[in-house]
């Protein structure tokens, strides 16, 4: 039986790999190991580890690897701290394969540790194009990984052009879409309104009335501009005057700038906004499905959004170059551009569902390949 170790470092990591974890857990030839660290164990980012445990998973280890400050310096140091801590856990757990998710800085620590320890590394969501430092991290992890699980053929083609062997590249779809497909089949909202009323701070939100859903994170390559950027978004929301659900930013460099802008705005105004640290994955997808418009720079608006057909306004450069569906309208950091785009999306309404990032069956495909595939640590690159 192969031991598969999944490393989760953030709420985005968890939503991106949960379907794979479920498929591994029920696979007769696989044993699931979970390491939870970075912002996923911090209360101010929503204690994602509590959500993971509430979903029935039991982490084998937790690792504190975040140096507070959310600057480029602390982000680099946190990567180094992760590289100090993760090898010890890998040595204790002795996994047969490590699964690394996407493109975050903790992903880089995971990839380097596994590669140096001759543990086969599987990488999901590689080969994609975006803005920020994530672009470089994603491609660097691809070069360290031994098995690749891109979401679509375009991403796979980029991985192949980087010299990776075709036999190691498997187009499986995005595991995040698995959860979306499942929720669309049920469309249950049990407990959603109660959760919204109980958690967060701000005005009450009635999900039976039109509302906006906002998720905007710092852009690491535009460090120092986060407060001004979120300020334009908040001023746009003030002009729109619609009930709004808004998430606090992730832990990337510039997070405190964005959070400071949100706090200042909240103290100065009395907006129609309710602020939340985190949502269980399924609840967030249900909110996306019910929201009148998605606003911000989250990849969820592009990935899950295109499958849901959710109208979305993408702000700034964070998702530059990422393949997108018809549901996206791109704007700059300007309140009037944002307001105009939101109003256009409100007038348009829902879009047809698209399947750019898969059909909702990625998890079982990945589990089957991890169980039966040949895992080699000596890479055969093709140039």
Image (cartoon, helix red, strand yellow):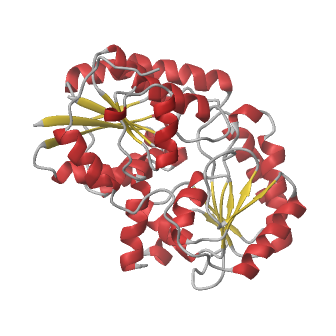
Question: In the figure, is residue 260 to the left or right of 283?
Answer: right
Residue 220: where, in percent of width, then height?
69, 34
Q: Would residue 99 be seen by someone viewing this image from the given angle?
A: no
Q: Quick one: which residue is furthest to the right in this view? A: 336
Give the camera-side residue of 44 and 224. 224
Q: Quick one: which residue is furthest to the front in this view? A: 383
Q: How many marks?
A: 0
Q: Is residue 13 above or below residue 51?
A: above
Residue 155: where, in percent of width, then height?
50, 43
Q: Quick one: which residue is furthest to the bottom in this view? A: 208
Q: Would residue 25 be seen by someone viewing this image from the given angle?
A: yes
Identify the residue at image location x=67%, y=45%.
321
Question: In the figure, is residue 194 to the left or right of 335?
Answer: left
Q: Is residue 273 above or below residue 148?
A: below
The quadrant of the rendering that contains the N terminus is top left
Identify the residue at image location x=50%, y=27%.
162
Residue 352: where, in percent of width, then height?
57, 76
Question: In the figure, is residue 85 to the left or right of 304?
Answer: left
């Amino acid at each position: 039986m192969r031991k598969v170790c999944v490393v989760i470092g953030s709420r985005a990591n968890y939503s991106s790999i949960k379907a794979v974890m479920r498929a591994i857990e029920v696979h007769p030839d696989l044993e699931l190991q979970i390491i939870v660290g970075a912002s996923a164990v911090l209360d101010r980012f929503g204690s994602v580890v509590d959500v993971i445990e509430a979903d029935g998973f039991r982490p084998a280890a937790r690792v504190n690897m975040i140096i507070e400050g959310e600057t480029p310096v602390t982000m680099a140091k946190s990567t180094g701290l992760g590289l100090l801590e993760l090898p010890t856990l890998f040595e204790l757990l002795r996994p047969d394969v490590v699964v690394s998710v996407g493109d975050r800085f903790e992903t880089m620590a995971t990839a380097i540790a596994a590669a140096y320890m001759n543990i086969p590394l599987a990488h999901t969501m590689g080969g994609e194009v975006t803005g920020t430092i994530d672009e470089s991290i994603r491609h660097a992890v691809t070069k360290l990984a031994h098995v690749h699980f891109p979401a679509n053929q375009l991403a796979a083609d980029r991985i192949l052009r980087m010299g990776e062997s075709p036999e190691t590249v498997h187009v499986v779809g995005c595991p995040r879409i698995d959860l979306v497909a499942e929720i669309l089949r049920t469309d249950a909202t049990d407990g959603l309104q109660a959760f919204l009323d109980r958690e967060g701070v701000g005005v009450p939100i009635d999900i039976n009335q039109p509302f906006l859903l906002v998720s905007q994170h710092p852009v690491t390559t535009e460090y120092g501009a986060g407060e001004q950027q979120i300020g334009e978004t908040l001023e746009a929301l003030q002009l729109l005057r619609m009930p709004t659900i808004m998430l606090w930013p992730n832990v990337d460099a510039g997070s405190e700038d964005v959070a400071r802008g949100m706090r200042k705005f909240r103290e100065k105004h009395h907006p129609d906004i309710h602020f939340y640290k985190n949502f269980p994955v399924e609840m967030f997808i249900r909110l996306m499905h019910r929201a009148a418009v998605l606003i911000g720079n989250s990849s969820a608006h592009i990935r899950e959004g295109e499958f849901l057909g959710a109208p979305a306004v993408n702000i700034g450069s964070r998702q530059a170059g990422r393949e997108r569906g018809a549901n996206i309208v791109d704007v700059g950091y300007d309140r009037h551009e944002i307001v105009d785009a939101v109003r256009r999306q409100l007038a348009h309404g829902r879009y047809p569902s698209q399947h750019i990032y898969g059909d909702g069956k990625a998890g079982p495909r990945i589990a089957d390949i991890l169980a039966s595939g040949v895992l080699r640590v000596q890479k055969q690159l093709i140039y």
